Image (spheres, rainbow, N blue to C red):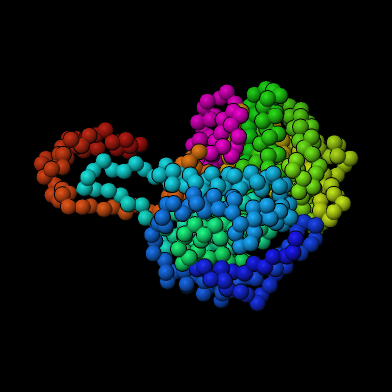
Amino acid sequence: MAATVIDPLVAGVPAPSSDRQLLTDVFGAALADVGVAPRLGAQLALDRLRAAADGLRPAARIFPEAARLFATAELDGEDPEAYVDRVVRSSGLPARTVRLAVTDLVAEIEALDRTVAAELPPPLPSATHRVEWVPGGRVFAAVMAGNHPLPHVSWVHALLVGYSVLVRPGSRDPFTPRRLVAALLAAGLPPHKLAHLPCDHRAAAFLLDSADRGIVFGGDQAVASWRDARHVATRGPGRSRALLDTAPTPELLDHLATAVGYDGGTRCTNLSAVLTTAPVARVADELAARLARLPVLPATDPEATLLVVGRERAEAMRRHVATLADGLTDHSTPHYDGDFVVDLGDGSFLLRPLVLSADRADHPAVGTELGFPFVVVAPWSADRDAGALGPALVLNLLTDDDALVSRAVRDPRIRKVTVGTALPWDLVPGLPHDGSLTQFLLEPKGVVVPGAVVTGTDVPGADVPGADVPGADVPGADVPGADGR
């Protein structure tokens, strides 16, 4: 396959850049010639979108049609199979993972209207007073990571509620947003609503800083400077984990192995830590044996399930794991003749699952996320280790302790709780993944129409100051804490 040319696209108009970047695939071959927008190009794109931004929601029919086109149509001379092949070669994701991601992305886009409705409060029961949820600005910037196609639903969500959107693709996968942009435009999205803008980190930071709302995906370093920015949603490492607080039955161990290894461990909801009251070595050995059965195959093989990377990234990962695993027990590499990195002989390298164990729940390695099936098993005690349950995007509780479940739900460091063998990525429209994206994008505005009450005469209790207000007859009565406690 010849290298494809990708240039910025602003409001439906190509904006070729003289700054070029060659994207190579996991085999070391040229895959794409990418035009990189300079800082001035990012400024011009932002200005162009902001000048035309209207805050209006596009026609609802556009989004399911765009989802259909994304999955089935030839767009910009690329058919669905060519798209899958490019993402496999650029990201190292197995072909079946990319196809599943397409299916999931289509389903989430088709459900966006229901998701938005489910994430907002029910309307006021009044004919004269209502709350309108409107965009909190006009321009949205999305800085993507490129490790998986599914997070691109986030900026489509922003489009649906009325924002004009600038998408900065991840360095390893400019193909998914490029194809999604083409599908949206072909489905009838007004071109002035959207820009696809490959750019460097400096220009990406400018976009986030200048947009009214934004979202950034990436590792700790990528999101750290935006964690306190109220207008930017950060999506960093998930550090999803499980608590196994019951007997480690084969069914539960199978569930945990699936939650670690599904999609090659590339989701932020894959487990990266298992805390347990059972014998740690036994749980770790059982997980390692199960994960070792995942096949060693090239990413293009229909049965492949594990991530493939280029030589440089493989060597960097090997060095990183060697440092990280110092002082931990390795339960996996005995299954692999001592090395979790496999040279596939075609220029690419496969990362086999790693299960390590620690001697304490607060070990620094607990919760480390590496982008392939990697999990640390550690002991847990309710008296000593309650704090080790977070931070976590998802906490999977395998326990009979209802009080523990209740405490986890109230823990602000835990974004989502699953109980039993529900998988960490299980979602329905309106169920928060990492808070409510809809309520981050929108803000409530009161609207009052003719016929509304304009005096206090019809307000219950208005004829007698304080009447019908609990405790109003005795100042401070029945008010919790009024006695000074």
Tell me: 55 left or right of 92.
Answer: left
> Does residue 50 appear in the picture of this structure?
yes
Q: Residue at x 49, y 37 (%)?
A: 410
Q: Nearer the viewer, residue 227 or 112?
A: 112
106 or 157, which lies in front?
Answer: 106
Task: Tell me the residue at 63%/27% (across/down).
Answer: 245
Q: In the rendered structure, does residue 126 fall within the stretch colored magenta? A: no
Residue 62 lies, in percent from the top left, at: 46, 54
In the rendered picture of this protein, how many numbered marks are placed on residues? Answer: 0
Quarter of the N terminus within the rendering: bottom right
460 above or below 314?
A: above
Residue 284 in which image quadrant: top right
Q: Nearer the viewer, residue 360 or 42?
A: 42
Examine the structure image and report whether residue 402 is included in the region drawn in magenta. yes
Q: Is residue 258 above or below residue 56?
A: above
Instruction: Where is residue 149? Give x, y as percent.
Output: 62, 51
Q: Residue furthest right?
A: 337
Expressed as whole percent of the image width and height from the top left, the position of residue 463 reads 10, 41
What's drawn in magenta, residue-wise? 399-427
State the image coordinates of residue 333 (x, y, percent, origin top left).
84, 39
Q: Is residue 211 visible?
A: no
Q: Nearer the viewer, residue 427 or 84?
A: 84
- Give the vertical position of 370 relative to 291 (above or below): below
- Quadrant of image for the C terminus: top left
The answer to whether 449 appears left or right of 304 in the picture is: left
